[in-house]
Image (cartoon, rainbow, N blue to C red):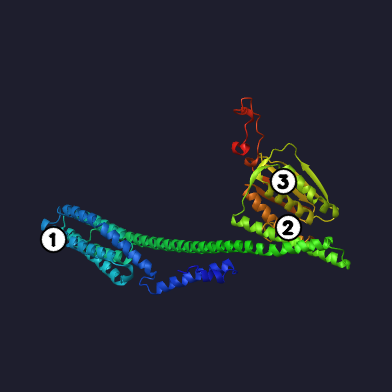
Amino acid sequence: MSELTPEIIQRGRGADPIEVARRRRANRELQATREKLTSTSGLERAFDYEILRQFAETRRNAVVVMYLLTGIIGAAATVWVSAPLVLMWMALIMIAMSVSFVFTSRYLKLEPTTVAVGAWRLRFVIGEFVQGAAWAVLLVALYQSGAQGAQTFLLFLALLITAVTAMLAANVPAAVYFGIAPLSGAILSSIGSLHNYEWLTMAMVAAGGQLYFAILANRLYSSTVATLEFRAEKDALIAELEQAKANSDEARRRAEEANIAKSHFLATMSHELRTPLNAIMGFSEVMKGELFGKHHVPAYREYANDIYSSGKLLLDIINEILDLSRIEAGRYELKEEAVSLAHVVEDCHHMLQMRAKNRSITIRETIERNLPKIWADERSIRQVALNLLSNAIKFTPTGGEVTIKVGWTSSGGQYLSVRDTGPGIPEEEIPVVLQSFGRGSLAIKTAEQGTGLGLPIVKGLIDMHGGQLILNSKLREGTEVIVTLPPSRVMDTLAPMDESGLEPAPSQTPRTARRAAA
């Protein structure tokens, strides 16, 4: 069976999944054809062994019942046949059954790889023929007795043994045919010697019954083969799923190792870059401020200002990359405390007001008053607000408008909404901008250059707080980003203590005692 090895997966990473599935199916069919060419029955070799194994188990498990059936039939036959002849027949049929039992037991003990399927099939067919011949001996004895009722019992016995043989030997059609052939021969020979139309009719019905059971045995064999094929396909599918799971686990392990290595690399490089970068920014700030005297060439002041601005931008990028790597690695620690979301958003608004004013962008603010505090990391919430407002101002054209909203969610949590009138994001690109370093196509053309880490950092920080980020956008109409915090983060005001100082009033207990007590 073809397996999804790592080499095949690596070669087919960029391949069409339909083409990969087609090749896998072709490999399966090729192997099945090769198995059939080496088989003696036109089936796969594993099917040949399994069918004979089922035949052997059925025959071995039914031997006690067949002994009992033989005794009952022998006792009934003594009504028309002499007892010594019946005893001789019973000895003959039981010997044949015992030999068949030995063969089937020996076959079941063999290893599948050492079994000569063709030879064992021939042994089973011969065993069925011998048993059928032994049953035919009793039919002939009943026919020759000429007693009244013996012929009717003969036909009933022929149909009974035919049915039993068809059921027990259905997995080997040849064994069924050779097992009922002697019975059919006995019936046909009696038809030729009698001219009784009633007997002739009954004999023809018996022959038709034998034909029916032979066809039924063939149908049972076809059903068995179909069941084996379905089971083989199921086993192959399970094997492929297990291989795919193993490949997935290996890929996940390598990804985790790569992520750890990336985090270590970023932490090391951020330290190595920050040290000289701080020196560059410090000296450039001294130079642009002309602390040790004025520049003789005015352009030097501009160069120093450009150096300082570039260093600050690079430092911001390093900080964003480091924050994102910590979030992805699960090493970002939240220092939770009581925080006013409204106050944080207002502070961020004032910090970015000058940048918006320089581009003639109007910022409208709608904040519900008397909002209770939330239990969160203030630095993280401030970074979320700054990133959303910075993005909105960055992507809003000159003369545009940015709308800020803070309020209650329908479930009792709190939300922050930032909406701009920028170019918008195509619907198919929304998952892209939420990925690390992802940027929309229109944003690249119309906005300032950035790293594409703002929204991923926001999403990571909000997820750590148990909240949710929702991004709604329409082309050329603008974008709205909504972050929500769950009700469990909202704190009620502590109830006033009574004079005894023991406990607050029952109607004013905090929503979460642990957070309120903090």
- Mark 2 and mark 3: span between their CA atoms? 23 Å
Residue 449 visible, this angle? no
Residue at x-position 34% and y-position 67%: 49
Whether residue 85 sits left or right of residue 177 in the image: it is left
> Residue 284: x and y, percent?
79, 63
The residue beneath circle 1 is 88
Screen quadrant of the C terminus: top right
Q: Which three-letter amino acid code belongs to the residue tagged 3?
A: Leu
Q: Nearer the viewer, mark 2 or mark 3?
A: 3
Whether residue 76 sits left or right of residue 370 in the image: it is left
- How crowded pointer 3 is (Cα within 10 Å; few <14, some 14-19, many 20+) is rated as many
- In depth, the one of 15 and 23 nearer the eye is 15
Q: Which three-letter amino acid code belongs to the residue tagged 2?
A: Pro
Q: Which mark is residue 416?
A: 3
> Residue 87: x and y, percent?
13, 58
- In depth, the one of 263 and 105 nearer the eye is 263
Residue at x-position 59% and y-position 38%: 514
Q: Nearer the viewer, mark 1 or mark 2?
A: 2
Element at label 2: loop
Whether residue 316 sits left or right of residue 197 in the image: it is right
Q: Which three-letter amino acid code belongs to the residue tagged 1?
A: Met
Element at label 1: helix
The residue beneath circle 2 is 426
